[in-house]
Image (cartoon, rainbow, N blue to C red):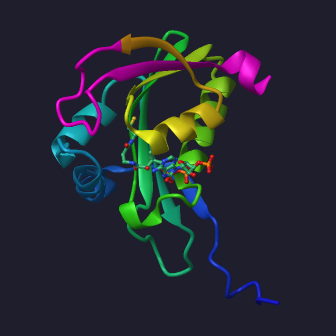
Amino acid sequence: MIPWWFSTPEPVIEEAVSDDFDALADLHERAFPIGWSADEISRLAAQPGVTVLKARRASYFGTRAPLGFVIVRVAADEGEILTIAVEPRQRGRGIGGRLMRTVLHRLYGERVASLFLEVDAANDAALALYRRLGFRKVGERKAYYQASEGDGGALVMRVDLAYRLG
Ligand SMILES: CC(C)(COP(=O)(O)OP(=O)(O)OC[C@H]1O[C@@H](n2cnc3c(N)ncnc32)[C@H](O)[C@@H]1OP(=O)(O)O)[C@@H](O)C(=O)NCCC(=O)NCCS
């Protein structure tokens, strides 16, 4: 049996602060063909209705670099995922799912009716994650992404929170 203190603790999800934005920009640059600077993330975070959540390893020895982050914007009773990215070496371990579930629970608590996102139709990992969380395709945009492994088509997806978490 592995002693409790030896096992890796589950990541903590919490609001990012301005000190995190350099690390988030770095992570974003490694996740997408077009990066966002720390200033761009900072300007986005200052907009009304925008929340930036990060995942970090729980540690007794201070804050560690973010493992992933998500940015969501809420206007009226609709939310939109603006971006989500997980550190390449940390993918496939449930961190993206944990970030998204935290967003869903928060928005449900704020009585947001539905959450939208756009995703490259060739992004299998992201599609697997979103479908598992109940997102369904509600629209399509042709030739939307310039740097795509597919034909650049985007899917617009939505989950209705009242039905999902009620
Ligand atoms: C999309 C992303 C955020 C997912 O983060 P993650 O921490 O790996 O997510 P999770 O581990 O919670 O779940 C990933 C799911 O994708 C699946 N997956 C991983 N790679 C896959 C692949 N190449 N093909 C199909 N499914 C894949 C996993 O099996 C898992 O699904 P499951 O739980 O049903 O088994 C991460 O891949 C990422 O940062 N990608 C680059 C940025 C990006 O594309 N963001 C989305 C923009 S819309």
Q: Is residue 54 left or right of residue 21?
A: right
Q: Is residue 164 above or below residue 55?
A: above
Residue 75 in percent (x, y) is at: 45, 14
Residue 70 or residue 153, whichever sits in front: 153
Residue at horizontal 57 percent and vertical 61 percent from the top = 93
Residue 88 in percent (x, y) is at: 37, 61
- Image quadrant containing the C terminus: top right
Residue at horizontal 39 percent and vertical 13 percent from the top = 140
Residue 131 in percent (x, y) is at: 60, 32
Q: How many marks?
A: 0
Residue at horizontal 82 percent and vertical 90 percent from the top = 1
Residue 151 or residue 133, whichever sits in front: 151
Residue 135 or residue 80, whichever sits in front: 135
Membership of 162 in magenta stretch: yes
Residue at horizontal 23 percent and vertical 57 percent from the top = 26
Q: Is residue 29 above or below residue 103?
A: below
- Residue extent of the magenta highlight: 141-166
Which image quadrant for residue 130? Answer: top right
Q: Is residue 97 above or below residue 5?
A: above
Q: Is residue 162 above or below residue 24?
A: above
Q: Is residue 147 left or right of residue 8?
A: left
Membership of 160 in magenta stretch: yes
Name the residue furthest front.
151
Residue 90 in percent (x, y) is at: 46, 64
Q: Is residue 21 left or right of residue 122?
A: left
